[in-house]
Amino acid sequence: MDIEKKLTHQAFLNREESISHLAYERENAFFQSIQDGDADTMRKLYKPFDSGDMGKLSNNPVRNLQYHLIITVALITRTCIEGGMEMEEAYNLSDIYIRGIDSCKSEDDVRMLHKEVVEDYTQRMYLMKKKNRYPKAIVVCMDYIYDNLHTKLTLPELANASGLTPPYLSRLFRKEVGLTISEYIMKKRIEAAQNMLRYSEYSCIAISDYLCFSSESHFIHVFRQHTGYTPRKYREQFFRVRKKESVNNL
């Protein structure tokens, strides 16, 4: 069967089964709301996956939703890059979520991850646009910190990257961000650790070493200060919540 015959046959099946694809304008508006970091509009336009309303990419219901979510992640990733998200961050996030999609065992697992994906990207775009209101030197400093969380960061190094003197960068950063540079670095390291605990199998000591904590005990102490959980309890709590949500959606 050639492609034209397949297209004709698929159109016939879709009409017979009342299957339609999302309106193009609505879909564009949804992706635009994510790019804008507009959570309220995104939630109004958000439509949970429903196999009955979607094109059939697989006869297996779970795999069908997985394929749709992978396509959605790819489209959101490119939309966010066009909106200014750092390319490396966007693609790394995409890789993490696609691996998560591959691990889904049920349709409810895919639907929950779909919701998580759109909320996460929207929040990141909102924070990015908020960050971009900072002076350029502060944005450069923040980006340098993000790209080098796995190394020992020093004030002279950050000042050199930002084109400012260390004392001036320190004062300006605290004035604009509301945190000292050290507090901001620690905040970003804890956020990175949370993601690693949620989406990877790395051990506590491996995460501690990667994020340049002085020791595993120091990492556990600081993590608990910021989140209220030890790293182990945080990982357990995350998976417990996901499991509970899955049961509630049955």
Image (cartoon, rainbow, N blue to C red):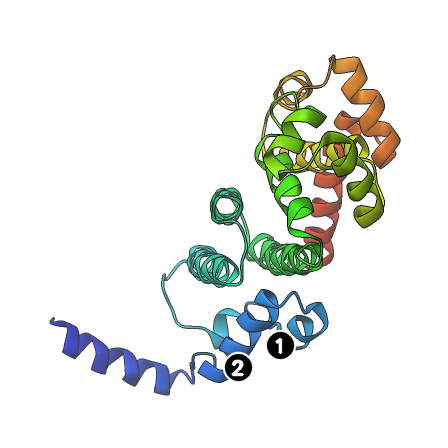
Q: Is residue 23 visible?
A: no
Residue under the point 60% across and 57% down: 121
* SS under mark 2: helix
Q: Residue at x 68, y 69 (%)?
A: 38
Q: Residues within 10 Å of mark 2 (few under 14, many from 20)?
A: few
Up/down of 189 relative to 8, above or below: above
Q: What amino acid type is highlighted by mark number 2?
A: Arg
Give the left or right position of residue 240, taking residue 61 as reference. right
Quarter of the image holding residue 186? Answer: top right
- Above or below 145: residue 14: below
- Residue type at mark 1 is Leu
Q: In the image, residue 238 lies at what x, y percent?
A: 73, 40
Q: Quadrant of the N terminus?
A: bottom left
**Direction left: furthest residue:** 2
Query: How many numbered marks appear?
Result: 2
Disc 1 marks which residue? 45
Q: Which mark is residue 26?
A: 2
Mark 1 vs 2: CB contact within 8 A? yes
Pick whichever, 207 or 229, lies toward us: 207
Residue 120 % position (x, y)? 64, 54
Residue positioned 72% across, 18% down in the render: 213
